[in-house]
Amino acid sequence: MTLSIAPLSPGFVAELSGVDLREKLDDAVIEGIVKAIDRYAVVVFRGQPLTEEQQIAFAERFGPLDIGLKRVSKAGQAAPKERLKNDILIDISNVDADGRPVQRTDPKIVNNIANQLWHSDSSFQSPPAAYSMLSAQTVARKGGDTEFADMRAAYDALDEDMKAELVELVGEHFALHSREILGADNWTQAQKDAIPRVHWPIVRSHPGSGRKLLFIGAHACRVLGMTVPEGRMLLQDLLEHATQREFVYRHKWTVDDLVIWDNRATLHRGRRFDFTEKREMRRSTTVDASGLLPAAA
């Protein structure tokens, strides 16, 4: 099998083909995928009907897997019944364990709406996430796309004064901040404590490409050394800058798509869809095996 790479835009997002992800791929192919992600940050595979076990086996070639925000629900007094057989996979859907769309008051809907905020998966933990791999099982008839924003290009486009201002700044990331933005505040202390707050430099360097980037998003709740309002306004200004259309790719899903993105180089968000219709996705997420993504030199 020969990996083929077709860029979808200059330097950001590429479609990869020529390989069957259900098979055990040789090391050279895996290395080729990693190099493509280092360059393009988001890669798209079409026509990959993966079982849960096949998705896990493929994802584990890129590092140890992690459940991220699922730790919060597991710290609840009554954790919801899992829809997926494998606990290491993350259910990105609006259906219950029996495959029926849930009611709008269900916590799954809160998660779906929170996913519509620009974010980087697991930026709220240490180590943070490296790759997320989302497999499309059932897609919405209308809406439900996913948008990706290039945080490398966003950094490059900042003026020199802003770059200088950001050099020493550190953001605090909290797992439940994005949910609290949406008014979901009925968390137990055990859930709040399940994932301690972490601090990351706002400007960082990617370990694969060496490019500087912005590390922001909906989990960033304040900037150290600033008042909360001042820091949040700066984070909002950076987010508005980083998600301008010229930095964004919008993916329209088809069944059996697998999209891989690098959380260290991108932000992403889901788009609205009719919650009375099924939308079923499975996510596998690797932790940053390189350790902690460094601050920019």
Image (spheres, rainbow, N blue to C red):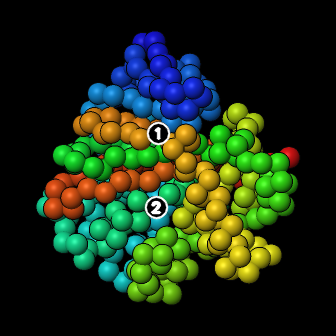
Judge from the rendering whether residue 28 lies leftward or rightward of residue 49; answer left or right: right
Q: Is residue 4 above or below residue 192?
A: above
* Amino acid type assigned to the residue bearing label 2 in the image: Leu
* Residue 36 placement (x, y as % from top left): 57, 27
Q: Name the residue carrying label 2.
A: 117
Q: Residue at (51%, 36%) from the top-left corner? A: 42
Judge from the rendering whether residue 297 lies leftward or rightward of residue 247; answer left or right: right
* Amino acid type assigned to the residue bearing label 1 in the image: Tyr
How far apart marks 1 and 2 lie (CA) works out to 15 Å
Q: Name the residue carrying label 1.
A: 249
* Residue 133 placement (x, y as % from top left): 43, 42
Q: Is residue 114 above or below residue 261?
A: below
Q: Tell me the quadrant of the picture where the N terminus can be found.
A: top left
Question: Disc 2 on helix, strand or loop?
Answer: loop
Q: Could you classify mark 1 by the number of other residues whose Cα lies within 10 Å: few (under 14), some (14-19), or many (20 or more)?
A: some
Q: Residue at (59%, 28%) from the top-left corner? A: 11
Quarter where residue 116 is shown: bottom left
Q: Earlier in the sequence, mark 1 or mark 2?
A: 2
Judge from the rendering whether residue 250 lies leftward or rightward of residue 261; answer left or right: left
Question: Disc 1 on helix, strand or loop?
Answer: strand
Residue 191 in sight: yes
Q: Could you classify mark 2 by the number of other residues whose Cα lies within 10 Å: few (under 14), some (14-19), or many (20 or more)?
A: many
* Residue 47 placement (x, y as % from top left): 29, 27
Residue 75 in sight: no
Q: Residue at (56%, 66%) from the top-left corner? A: 219
